[in-house]
Image (cartoon, rainbow, N blue to C red):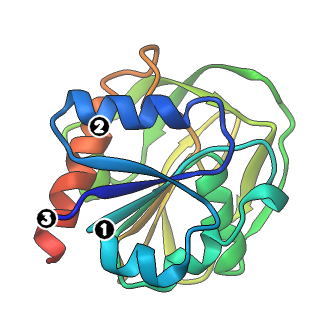
Amino acid sequence: MLPLFVVNNYGQFNHLILRTLRDLDIEAKLIPNTTPIQEVSDGCQGIILGGGPDINRAGISSQYLHLEKPVLGICLGLHVIADEFNGKVQSGQKGGYGAVNVTITEHDEILKGYPETMQVWASHADEVISIPPGFKRLATSSICGNEAIAHLNKSIFGIQWHPEVSHTFEGYRIFENFSRICQNSD
């Protein structure tokens, strides 16, 4: 079985995403965000766009969204998704990294098994203020209106928070759900 690729967008937690996946016995590989399209297309069953400091340092991450592979965008990865599909990303009103209470408005397959509200850890230095056409909102908070989104017809998901950190409530579940989505898309 092909691994999941974790795209390194220079975020401080990208290696922790990889470690979390391996702890869950999900085969994964960390790749640079400049990895050629064909290598990504042929080499994985799904793509996780990791976080990072700035969308201008996301390499060719946006091109990976068009490979007909399931994609999970985390923090900056969410912003790459929104930007590529004509949503709007801008500086958040509350920057910094810390606890946020998220309300799930729709339990899509990526959020399967979660309660209606939960505490997560996130940075809101930047956030999606307008969901792209063809996407739906999955979660919201008092800080950010679009904490999680999903494409209506493709397995493309984005979340503002960091499921890989221990402070996020049952963050591992997102990775298990994403792995199942990837296996079912083959």
The residue where tag 3 is placed is 183
Three-letter code for the amino acid on which mark 3 is drawn:
Gln
| Mark drawn on residue 11 | none
Which residue is at the front of the view, 97 or 65?
A: 65
Identify the residue at horizontal 78%, vertical 42% (top origin): 53
User: Does the rendering let one see residue 41?
Assistant: yes
User: Looking at the rendering, which quadrant does residue 40 occupy?
Assistant: bottom left
| Mark drawn on residue 44 | 1
Three-letter code for the amino acid on which mark 1 is drawn:
Cys
Q: Disc 3 vs disc 2: Cβ atoms closer than 8 Å?
A: no
Q: Disc 2 vs disc 1: Cβ atoms closer than 8 Å?
A: no
Measured along the vertical axis of the image, is residue 65 above or below residue 144?
A: below
Which residue is at the front of the view, 79 or 150?
A: 79
Instruction: Give x and y (percent) for residue 7.
Output: 52, 55
SS label for mark 2: helix
The residue where tag 2 is placed is 21
SS label for mark 3: helix
Identify the residue at horizontal 14%, vertical 77% (top origin): 186
Three-letter code for the amino acid on which mark 2 is drawn:
Leu
Q: Nearer the N terminus, badge 1 or badge 3?
A: 1
- Which tag is nearer the camera, tag 1 or tag 3? 1
